Structure formats: structure tokens, C-alpha cells
Image (cartoon, rainbow, N blue to C red):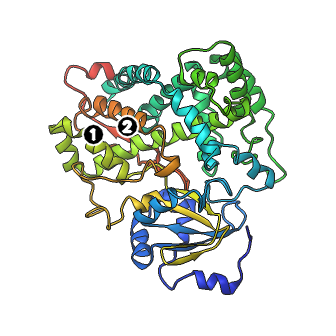
Amino acid sequence: MDAVRSDTELASRCDAGPDPSPLFDPRTYLDGVPHDLIAELRAHAAIHWVPEPELMGWEAGPGFWAVLTHELMNRVLRDPGTFSSHLGGTQIRDPQTAAMLEFVQRMMLNQDPPQHTRLRRLLMRSFTPSAVAELEATISARAERLVSAVVDRGGADFAKEVSAELPLLTLADIMGVPSVDRMLLFDWSNRVIGYQDAEYAVSDAFDPATGTEMARRACEVRAQIRPGPDGRLPDPRSREGLADMYAYAHDLATYKRANPGSDVVSILLAADDAEGGITNEEFETMFFLFAVAGNETLRNGIPGGLWALLQHPEQLDKLLADPELLPGAIEEMLRFMPPVVHFRRTASRDAELGGRSVRAGDKVVVFHVAANRDPAVFAEPDRFDIGRSPNDHLTFGAGPHFCLGAHLARRQMSAIFTESLWRMPNLRLDPARSPERLLSNFQHGFKHLPVQWDVPAGREAASL
């Protein structure tokens, strides 16, 4: 890809309309998604050229096309032949070196058919009915325990103390990771998703003394990760930046091949078809996908959904009066507060998109947060309506990369909200502490969501 466009070419790609630059800046999202700007941009054109200036330690990039409509997002995601996940990966910023690009291209998330098809098929077969049933049987019980641990206190950081733990425990079950090691998943996902955020970039919540020998070995590897000459740690998208995670994944695969269980990963490692089974290297990159995507999206999706309810108390009251509305409410939470801001593709050939000429090699970035509020699809798109139907949101994507974990994500959201909403009377934001959003232009979520509720009479003593 060209690192620099000529002034003439850039001028031909840019409009005299609203400035789209804030879409790229992670600091924009500390105040929430700029929906007003997105609406202005979309009214002007379906896609916009966005520059990538030097920013927050990032080198300048060539720029990208921002896709802002539901129709075009669907088109891009369903046409991997034209809009590739493999050519440049799925993050806006290009990998810093050719070696880094080659590394991320080995991940299932960054592959196109037929290579992607083989890995996805093996993974889907590993989610057997019995394995899924076993997972679902534990989700409700765990949600009940998590809420019970805080319900008599009358207040909690919902993002950190309630919603963060359930996806970690569920992922540990899926991957056969001992529950005592689950906070490693927390640290790894923080470091990847929040590497621009001062709190998340140095996440170190796991205590090696409480974990397995595999975990302790991984911590020893992490201790050897050193900052570069500029004082920054290696990019967590690189193998060097997450060397501890890949060391753990390698040890886990070795152990599971010798000691298989009923978990999804044991089934996956034993799976085989005409094209062969999963190699250790393929498993290590798939482990990255589980540990990061499977955790962070739901950890942000649950508090985001609660925030939407608390901002619209009439909708919360409506739900409390009729629990049968919860499935539709979850779909509206997902539409209104999608945890993923965008995903990138790269044009493999020249194409026309939204009336613009996209050139082979151009970055094409679909914005979930824009497509989910496209007025061509959603009536009154900025209105939060738990009874909205139909609700064809694109939070879980579309096409070959449609989220494999969509069913389990919905199941976990249902379990948490079933336990919390009806057991926390007069649930409200804590007026003494403000919510804190993650510094990221990729993940849309709350690091902290302090809430309060009324403790039922006779139970106050338990909260002291």
C-alpha cells in the first residue's frame, strides 16, 4: 500500500462536507461515539475518506474509507473477494513491519476463504450440542453468584465487579483454562484492546501465586518483555508484545492433546477433516481470538447495555414490568451500544462503493456504530426502544466472519440482566462517581460504571 497520496489525489477523495477526522482519534470516544457527526457525514455521503495523521505515538498512515451505511457495510462484509480481511488485517492501523503483517495474517480473524473456511468449520464443529449445553448450564448459576456477591451492598462498579467476571469464566470453560488462571485472560485482553489507555496498557491483575504452573511460566515470559528505545512496550498485536500469552497457549495445547476433556478446545484439538487438523501454531493464534474478542466485546457490551437502560428510565420501567421483553431489550442494547466501533477490510481490486472509486490497496473500514443507526433501516435510530422490531443490527457483523459467539453472548447478557435488574431496586448511576470510558477507537465501552440501588429492608446489615 502507498504510504502517501498525492495532494491532487487526496483532494479528489475529500469533500467540502463535515470533517471526518475525529472518527480516527481514540480521544473522541472518551465522550462517547460522535453520533451527531456520523449523521452529518452520512447525510453528505455514504462513505468518507479519513486521514491518519501522526497521533498519540502512532505514525502517520495513508488514510482509509469510512463506510457509514447499513447497506454498504453489509456489502463489504459479504464480499471477501473484493474486500479482504487478509491483505492488511482487520485493524485500521497497518502492522508496523512486514513480519508483523505476516504474523497477524495467520489469525483466523484476518483470513479469507478458503483458508478461513477450514478453520471456522473445525471450530464450529467443536461447539457440539453437549459442549454448548454444558456451558449454558453454568452461565445462569454464575450470574446468580456474581450478583449475590454485591446485591446487599447497595452499590458496585458494574463494569468491573459484575460484568467482567462472567465472560472470563465462560471463556475459561470454552478453552479449558483452569478458573484460577482466568485473570490472565483479563490482562491479555486489556493490553490488546486498551494499549492506548494508561490503565489498561499495564494491566496486571493476575497473581501468579494463585495460578497453575502454566500460568507461572507465562508470567516469567512476560517479565522478559522489555520496552524499546522509545520506552514503549512492543505492540500487543505482535507476537513479541504478547509472548506470555502465546507461551501459555502452546503449553495449554500440549496439555490438552495429552489430557483431553469435554471443553471446546479439547474437541477442537482432536478434530480432523480431509484438510487436516489444527496445528499448534494455528491454535495459538486462535487462542488470541478467544482471549481478546471473546472477552472484551461482552465485557463492554453488558455495561453498555445497562448504561442505555439507565439513560432511558421509561424503557427500564417497561422492562421491569414485563420480563418477557428482555430478549428484545438485549437486541436493542446491542444495536444502540455496540461494543465494537469498526472493522477494517482492504480492497483487493478497484471497485465502486457508495459512488466513490475505491482503489486496490485502499483500506475500507465499516463502522458498526454508524450502520446500527442508519435511518434508512431504523426508524428514529437515536431512540432507544426495547420493543423495536425488526431490529436488523450489525453488531455481530455479517458474511463469513459473522461472530461465532453471538449465541453465547446473548445468553450471558440475558443471565446477568435477569439476575441484576429485578434484584437491584431503583437501580441508578452513582451520583458521586462518574462512568469512565475506554480510550480506544476500536472498542466502545466503559472501564468503570458505578451504580447504586436500594437494599431491601432487613438486609442492610449484610452490606455493612
Q: Position of residue 194 (x, y in %)?
A: 59, 47
Q: Outermost residue toward the right?
A: 229
Front-lying residue, 3 or 317: 3
Q: Residue at x 39, y 46 (%)?
A: 304
What is the quadrant of residue 59 in the picture?
bottom right
Question: How many other residues sit within 10 Å of disc 2, few (<14), some (14-19) or many (≥20)?
Answer: some
Label 1 sits on a secondary structure element that is helix
Bin the neighbour count of mark 1 within 10 Å (Cα to Cα): few under 14, some 14-19, many 20 and up: some
Q: Residue flagged by tag 2: what amino acid is it? A: Arg
Judge whether residue 232 can be spotted in this image.
no
Identified at 49% across, 58% down, the residue is 29
Q: Which mark is residue 327?
A: 1
Left or right: 222 as drawn, with respect to 129: right
- Residue extending farthest to the front is 274
| Helix, strand or loop at mark 2 | helix
Which image quadrant: the N terminus? bottom right
Do the CB atoms of the residues marked 2 and 1 lie less than 8 Å apart?
Answer: yes
Q: Residue furthest top?
A: 259
Residue 410 tag number: 2
Of residue 279 and residue 410, the one placed in the foreground of this image is 279
In the depicted structure, whether residue 155 falls above or below residue 213? below
Q: From the top left corner, tell me how far across and down residue 429 is, in percent.
A: 33, 44
Q: Quadrant of residue 58?
A: bottom right
Disc on the earlier residue, 2 or 1:
1
- As drawn, is 329 to the left or to the right of 267? left
Q: Nearer the viewer, residue 460 or 31?
A: 31
At a point 53% along the width and 16% down the height, the residue shown is 262
Q: Which kind of residue does numbered mark 1 sit on?
A: Pro
Tell me residue 195's x, y (percent). 64, 48
Res 150 seen here: yes
View extreme (left): residue? 321
Give the quadrant of the C terminus: top left
